[in-house]
Image: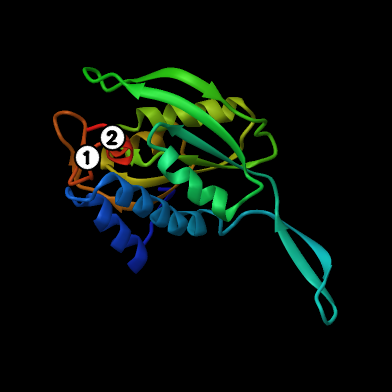
């Protein structure tokens, strides 16, 4: 399975802040951003790079730059991860994929998509909650239709059902996550999870 769980003290620390029912929106947003830094470091470990000469204050030496990178935020919860990506990869191209879950069927419903040219890019899809896998699978299909070939999904919390779905639909996509939780409840929420991430980010509970 193409799946990595981050085992780092800072990841676990910020995940705990996100899980805590009493964390207010402003602290929740800060913790989501901080946790995303740890996911980005893992997700970008194998990015293709170009080597070029650079002059240090003392002598010429080898320099390196990452090639084309794009981030696609799955709205709206993915916005909570985007600032961390922009901090770490300022030249990143950004796209948005708007999908909402039908509360009765749990199936994804598209309402917006705006993507850059992804044919030469390494793509990071920002989807914090991998529950049933429907939304992320749809988003992966969207970025593939825009030419993407190297795709990594960054998730905060995942459920077995979602990981299994993505592995079946898109086995070439690497998932990097902070947690692999127990299951989905009858309302398709991840448990123990952290609730509705979009609502907690933006105070719309």
Residue 192 locus on image (x, y percent): 17, 46
Mark 2: few/some/many CA within 10 Å (<14, 14-19, 20+): few
> Which residue is at the front of the view, 19 or 44?
19
Quadrant the C terminus occupies: top left
Say what secondary structure mark 2 lies in: helix
Judge whether 14 appears above or below 162 on screen: below
In the picture, measured across the screen, residue 68 lies left or right of residue 103, that is right
Q: Identify the image's colour scheme: rainbow, by chain, secondary structure or one colour.
A: rainbow
Q: Mark 1 Cα within 10 Å, few/some/many (few <14, many 20+)?
A: some
Q: Residue at x 41, y 38 (%)?
A: 127
For marks 1 and 2, give the CA distance: 8 Å
Q: Which numbered circle lies on residue 199?
A: 2
At 56% from the left and 32% from the top, the residue drawn is: 95
Residue 169's x, y, as percent? 43, 31
Judge from the rendering whether residue 150 lies leftward or rightward of residue 139; answer left or right: right
Q: Nearer the viewer, residue 165 or 204?
A: 204
Instruction: Tell which tag, 1 or 2, sits nearer the viewer.
Output: 2
Tally of numbered tags: 2
Mark 1 residue element: loop
In the rendered image, which residue does mark 1 sit on? 195
Percent position of residue 172, x then y:
51, 41
Q: Quadrant of residue 11?
A: bottom left
Is residue 90 left or right of 78 when viewed as pictured?
Answer: right
Assess whether mark 2 and mark 1 are in contact (beta carbons under 8 angstroms).
yes
Q: Can I make out residue 182 in this image?
A: yes
Kindly identify which numbered label has been placed on residue 75: none
Q: Residue at x 85, y 80 (%)?
A: 59
- Residue 70's place in the image compared with 46, above or below, is above
Q: Residue furthest bottom?
A: 58
Q: Quadrant of residue 111?
A: top left
């Amino acid at each position: 399975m193409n799946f990595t769980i981050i085992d780092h003290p800072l990841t676990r620390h910020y995940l705990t802040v996100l899980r805590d029912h009493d964390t207010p929106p402003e602290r929740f947003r800060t913790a989501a951003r901080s946790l995303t830094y740890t996911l980005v470091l893992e997700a970008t470990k194998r990015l293709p790079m170009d080597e070029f000469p650079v002059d240090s204050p003392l002598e010429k030496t080898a320099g390196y730059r990452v090639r084309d990178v794009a981030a696609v935020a799955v709205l709206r919860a993915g916005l909570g991860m985007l600032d961390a990506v922009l901090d770490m990869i300022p030249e990143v191209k950004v796209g948005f994929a708007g999908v909402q879950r039908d509360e009765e069927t749990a199936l994804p419903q598209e309402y917006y998509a705006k993507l850059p040219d992804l044919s030469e890019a390494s793509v990071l899809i920002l989807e914090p909650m991998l529950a049933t896998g429907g939304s992320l699978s749809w988003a992966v299909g969207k970025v593939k239709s825009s030419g993407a070939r190297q795709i990594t999904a960054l998730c905060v919390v995942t459920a077995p059902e979602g990981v299994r779905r993505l592995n079946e639909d898109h086995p070439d996509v690497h998932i990097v996550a902070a947690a692999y939780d127990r299951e989905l409840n009858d309302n398709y929420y991840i448990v123990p999870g952290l609730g509705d991430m979009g609502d907690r980010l933006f105070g719309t509970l």
